[in-house]
Image (cartoon, rainbow, N blue to C red):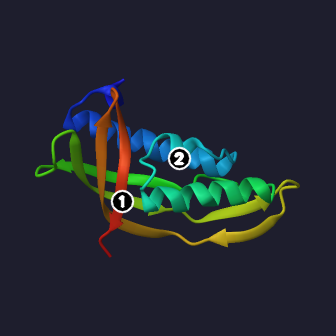
């Protein structure tokens, strides 16, 4: 699996994997999943993890994927064991439903250009932080 390689391409593959798991965390929901792939100090990750926990506690879930990665381009300048990436992730228009399948609210679609930092630790990548550029 490319996401397990300590290369810029591995970091790029990990970003795709991370956002696939992000969607699982919100569509099932599955608290703890985002947290397991990120640094404890990652503010973006803490917020996303809180959404998964809130959904779970209210017996709600996203009916379809919440986000999609459009691009993830590694670039240089990161400290040792880290990789910077310029990403474009799309927040998809989604319905949030209760356990009976009734729509309780919706989220609007928007494109979020951002910088993402990942770090190689103990043989795996993890998200350090995401910073939106708009």
Left or right of 17? Residue 2 is left
List the single residue furthest toward the front.
Answer: 41
Compared to residue 134, the image places residue 40 above or below, namely above
Where residue 29 appears, x then y in whole percent? 69, 48
Q: Earlier in the sequence, mark 1 or mark 2?
A: 2
Q: Is residue 5 visible?
A: yes
**Residue found 33% across the figure and 65% down from its top:** 131
Where residue 44 appears, x then y in whole percent? 45, 61
List the single residue furthest toward the left.
Answer: 77
**Residue found 70% across the figure and 60% down from its top:** 54
Where residue 120 appears, x then y in whole percent? 29, 36
Compared to residue 72, the image places residue 125 above or below, namely above
Q: Is residue 66 visible?
A: no
Question: Crowding at label 1, few (<14), some or many (≥20) Cα neighbours within 10 Å?
Answer: some
**Residue found 72% across the figure and 71% down from its top:** 105
CB within 8 Å, label 1 to label 2: no
Left or right of 74? Residue 17 is right
What is the distance, in whole Å, between disc 1 and disc 2 at their CAs?
Answer: 13 Å
Secondary structure beneath dot 2 equals: helix
**Residue found 78% across the figure and 56% down from its top:** 57
Of the numbered discs in the image, which one, if any, rests on residue 34? 2
Left or right of 129? Residue 10 is left
Question: Crowding at label 2, few (<14), some or many (≥20) Cα neighbours within 10 Å?
Answer: many
Instruction: Specify the quadrant that holds the C terminus.
Output: bottom left
Seen from the viewer's position, the closer of residues 43 and 65 is 43
For disc 1, the marked residue is 130
């Amino acid at each position: 699996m490319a996401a397990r390689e300590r290369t810029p391409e591995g970091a790029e593959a990990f970003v795709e994997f991370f956002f696939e798991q992000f969607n699982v965390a919100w569509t099932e929901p599955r608290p703890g999943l985002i947290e397991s792939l990120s640094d404890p100090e990652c503010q973006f990750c803490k917020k996303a993890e809180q959404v998964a926990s809130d959904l779970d506690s209210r017996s709600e879930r996203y009916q379809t994927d919440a986000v999609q990665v459009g691009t993830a381009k590694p670039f240089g300048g990161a400290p040792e064991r880290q990789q910077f990436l310029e990403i474009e992730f799309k927040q998809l228009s989604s319905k949030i439903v209760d356990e009976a399948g009734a729509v309780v609210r919706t989220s609007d679609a928007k494109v979020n250009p951002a910088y993402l930092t990942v770090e190689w630790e103990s043989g795996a990548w993890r998200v350090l932080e995401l910073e939106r550029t708009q």
